[in-house]
């Protein structure tokens, strides 16, 4: 049976307030501090991934939880405007939409999130008919959504038993605890999509050996794909590491680049491209998304991403730098 959707994304969605040129030490005491730039844009790992996938041509649906407020309407309107089906999203009548403020200082940033109704999303909020209509289900931000996380292992196992595939981007654990329960969810994923720091934490490694962490994750999940910033991307397949280099860009803002990477990898993988080709597409999508402020404004089309891959390597373009992927 043909699926109605190539991809269902389940996870977080919120507005991002991005302030650039923020000093390392904030001047409290009611002093006003000027910064170089500011923007309000769509945020949340799940929402950014969904927008990136739709931009690449995947038939994409998103399920998340927003409040019955202006911020929630902004989130849903933005997703809809970018071609994502949000008809089965949950609108919470009592708890506010989450909000993130991102303070950017050069290549680094601080991320401050008021979680609002995000932690209240649960498996029971996800329409089974929508799940049945999807070829692939991707879940984001495990640690921000404890109710969802609690039901993930059984839910993902059921999805896989019906022939659909699954992926997970846990994102960071704000508590720093890296709850052991995540291992049960990882075991039911076909693709894992952490960055380097997350891969090390999930594998329980303190030696900084990302290749070993990727190998360790391959023993407990399907295919680990690690975002490596300036070093590109790394996967572990058939007992060996598979790597691709980063794509050269002149970054404006790296917020959400890792989520666009996720979208690119899933588009390649679901489209039947080989592993190396999917990794290159992912790296291109992540890098090209940094051309504008926020996670969604500069997400590429498939044609743009493929054209970027075909261009000369980073050494041929003076003044370009490789960027990190969140």
Image: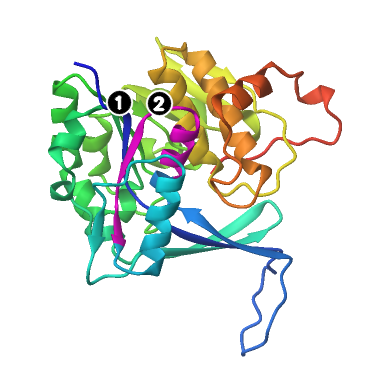
Q: Are marks 2 and 1 in contact (CB under 8 Å)?
A: yes
- Quadrant of the rendered image containing residue 213: top left
| Residue 143 visible in the shown view | yes
Give the extent of the magenta segment.
48-66
Image coordinates of residue 266 in percent, x first then y, are 42, 26
Q: Element at badge 2? A: strand
Question: For mark 2, what is the residue?
Answer: 224
61 is within the stretch colored magenta: yes
**Category of crowding for the residue at label 1, using alpha-carbon neighbours closer than 10 angstroms: few (below 14), some (14–19), many (at least 20):** some
Q: Residue at x 75, y 36 (%)?
A: 321
Q: Is residue 197 above or below residue 114?
A: above
Question: For mark 1, what is the residue?
Answer: 221
**Category of crowding for the residue at label 2, using alpha-carbon neighbours closer than 10 angstroms: few (below 14), some (14–19), many (at least 20):** many
**Which part of the image, by quadrant, shows the N terminus?**
top left
272 is within the stretch colored magenta: no
Please tell me which residue lies in front, 287 or 62.
62
Q: Could you tell whether 104 is left or right of 234 in the image?
A: right
Q: Is residue 109 above or below residue 195?
A: below
Q: Residue at x 24, y 29 (%)?
A: 187
Image coordinates of residue 315 in percent, x first then y, are 81, 24
């Amino acid at each position: 049976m043909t699926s109605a959707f190539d991809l269902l994304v389940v996870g977080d969605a919120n507005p991002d307030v991005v302030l650039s040129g923020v000093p390392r030490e904030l001047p409290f005491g009611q002093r006003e501090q000027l910064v170089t730039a500011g923007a309000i844009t769509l945020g949340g790992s799940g929402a950014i991934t969904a927008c990136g996938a739709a931009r690449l041509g995947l038939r994409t649906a998103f399920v998340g939880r927003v409040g019955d407020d202006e911020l929630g309407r902004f989130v849903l309107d933005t997703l809809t405007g970018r071609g994502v089906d949000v008809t089965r999203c949950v609108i919470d009548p009592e708890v506010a939409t989450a909000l993130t403020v991102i303070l950017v200082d050069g290549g680094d940033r601080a991320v401050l999130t008021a979680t609002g109704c995000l932690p209240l999303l649960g498996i029971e909020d996800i329409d089974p008919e929508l799940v049945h209509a999807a070829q692939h289900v991707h879940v984001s931000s495990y640690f921000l959504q404890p109710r969802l996380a609690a039901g993930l292992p059984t839910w993902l196992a059921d999805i896989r038993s019906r022939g659909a595939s699954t992926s997970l981007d846990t994102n960071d654990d704000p508590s720093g605890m890296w709850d052991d329960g995540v291992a049960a969810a990882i075991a039911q994923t076909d693709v894992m999509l952490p960055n380097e720091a997350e891969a090390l934490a999930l594998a329980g490694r303190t030696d900084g050996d990302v290749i070993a962490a990727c190998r360790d994750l391959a023993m407990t999940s399907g295919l680990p794909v690690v975002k490596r910033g300036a070093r590109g991307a790394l996967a572990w397949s058939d007992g060996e590491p598979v790597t691709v280099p980063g794509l050269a860009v002149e970054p404006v803002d790296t917020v959400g680049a890792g989520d666009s990477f996720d979208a690119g990898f899933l588009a390649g993988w679901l489209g039947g491209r080989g592993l190396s080709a999917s990794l290159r597409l992912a790296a291109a999508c992540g890098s090209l998304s940094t051309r504008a402020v926020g996670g969604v404004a500069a997400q590429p089309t498939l044609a743009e991403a493929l054209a970027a891959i075909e261009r000369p390597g980073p050494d041929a373009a003076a003044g370009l730098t490789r960027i990190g992927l969140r």
